[in-house]
Image (cartoon, rainbow, N blue to C red):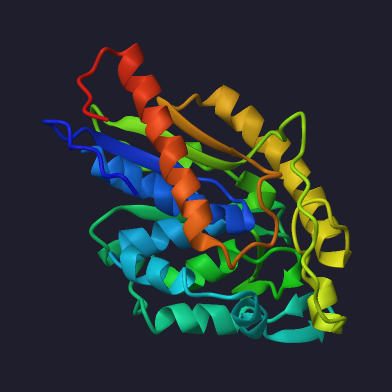
C-alpha cells in the first residue's frame, strides 16, 4: 500500500465497523488508511466481522492477525470450519477463534487501551446486547454467530447470535470524546447497478466444498441464507446511517465479495483505497490540510 504522509495534527476518530463477512477484511485497510493519514483511533464499536477486526485492533495485534489472514488458502478456510451439523448450526465456530487466540491472547475488554464494544443479539428478548467488559473473545464469538451457520452462544439467560441481526452498524454505541470525528466503515453497502460476475473456479464435488460458495452470484444453502440476511441487514444499516450520519463514511458494496476468506490482501487493499477517498472527501469539504 502507498503510505501517505501524516497530517501535522492527530484528529481523534470514533470508529464504527459494520458487519459483512469476508468483506470485513476491508476494515483492516480502512484502519490502516486512517492511521497512515495521521488520525488517532480513540474508540471502536463493531458488529459481527466488524467486532472481530475492531477487537483485534483494540488489543494491539491487527498486523499479526492480518499477516495470518493473508496466508489463508481456500483449503485452509475449509479446514477452519469445524462442521458439526447440529440442530441449530452447521459449524461450531470454535476452531477459528482458538486459532486467533494463538496470535491474540484473550484480554478483558475494560483493560484494553482503546475503548471497544461489540454487539450481539439475544434471541430470547429480541434485543441487542452490547459487550463493554469481560472476555474479548467471548464478545467476538457471540457477535459473529451467524444464524444457521455458527452455533449460538449461551450466556446466562441469553441466547446470543450475530450482532448484525439487531444492529449491523452500532453508531450509537461507540464511545465519543470532545472534538472527535465519527467515522463509519460500511462493507454492506447497497449493491451496484451492474453486478460483476466471476465464473466459479473448477473444484471437486465434495459435500463440504459444495456448501462454500465460490463467488457472488452462485447460489447454495450457505450463500442463500447469507445473502438473504445481508439484504435485510443492508437496509437496516442504510437507515442507521441516515439517523446518525457519520463525519466520514467508507462504503464497500455488499456484492463485492461473498465467501472469499482466502483473499484478505485484495479486500484489505480495496478498503484502504476506499477509506483514503473518504478522507479526501472529508478534508476537501472542511478545507483541512492533507498530504494524501
On screen, residue 115 above or below 79: above
In the drawing, does residue 178 fall left or right of residue 280?
left
User: Can residue 134 be seen in the rendering of this structure?
Assistant: no
Front-most of residues 62 and 149:
62
Considering the image in quadrants, where does the C terminus appear?
Answer: top left
In the rendered image, residue 212, in percent from the top left (x then y), is placed at 77, 70
Measuring 32% from the left and 59% from the top, which residue is drawn there? Answer: 58
| Point 33% across, 74% down: residue | 107
Where is residue 134? Give x, y as percent: 40, 69
Q: Where residue 133 sits: x, y (%)?
A: 38, 63
In this rendering, would 183 be left or right of 206? left
Q: Which residue: 35% across, 76% down?
A: 104
Where 274 sits versus 226, above or below?
above
Return the residue found at the far left.
8
Q: Position of residue 117 (x, y in %)?
A: 42, 54
Closer-to-camera residue (287/91): 287
The quadrant where residue 36 appears: top left
Query: Taking the image as drawn, is residue 283 in sight?
Result: yes
45 lies above or below 200: above
Amino acid at each position: 500500500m502507498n503510505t501517505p504522509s501524516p497530517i501535522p495534527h492527530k484528529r481523534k476518530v470514533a470508529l464504527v465497523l459494520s458487519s459483512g463477512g469476508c468483506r470485513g477484511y476491508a476494515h483492516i485497510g480502512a484502519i490502516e488508511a486512517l492511521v497512515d493519514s495521521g488520525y488517532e483511533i480513540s474508540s471502536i464499536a463493531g458488529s459481527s466481522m466488524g467486532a472481530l477486526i475492531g477487537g483485534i485492533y483494540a488489543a494491539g495485534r491487527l498486523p499479526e492477525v492480518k499477516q495470518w489472514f493473508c496466508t489463508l488458502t481456500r483449503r485452509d478456510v475449509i479446514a477452519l470450519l469445524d462442521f458439526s451439523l447440529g440442530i441449530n448450526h452447521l459449524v461450531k465456530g470454535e476452531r477459528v477463534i482458538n486459532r486467533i487466540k494463538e496470535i491474540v491472547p484473550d484480554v478483558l475488554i475494560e483493560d484494553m487501551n482503546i475503548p471497544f464494544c461489540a454487539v450481539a443479539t439475544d434471541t430470547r428478548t429480541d434485543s441487542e446486547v452490547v459487550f463493554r467488559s469481560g472476555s474479548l473473545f467471548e464478545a467476538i464469538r457471540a457477535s459473529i454467530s451467524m444464524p444457521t451457520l455458527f452455533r449460538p452462544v449461551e450466556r446466562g439467560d441469553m441466547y446470543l447470535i450475530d450482532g448484525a441481526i439487531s444492529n449491523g452498524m452500532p453508531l450509537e454505541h461507540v464511545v465519543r470524546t470532545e472534538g472527535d470525528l465519527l467515522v463509519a466503515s460500511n462493507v454492506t453497502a447497497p449493491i451496484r447497478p451492474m453486478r460483476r460476475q466471476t465464473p466459479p473456479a473448477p473444484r471437486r464435488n465434495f459435500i463440504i466444498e459444495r456448501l462454500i460458495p465460490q463467488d457472488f452470484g452462485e447460489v447454495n444453502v450457505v450463500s442463500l441464507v447469507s445473502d438473504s440476511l445481508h439484504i435485510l441487514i443492508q437496509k437496516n444499516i442504510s437507515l442507521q446511517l441516515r439517523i446518525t450520519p457519520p463525519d466520514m463514511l467508507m462504503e464497500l458494496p455488499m456484492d463485492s465479495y461473498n465467501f472469499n476468506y482466502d483473499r484478505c490482501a485484495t479486500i484489505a487493499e480495496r478498503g484502504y483505497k476506499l477509506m483514503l477517498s473518504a478522507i479526501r472527501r472529508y478534508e476537501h469539504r472542511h478545507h483541512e490540510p492533507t498530504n494524501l
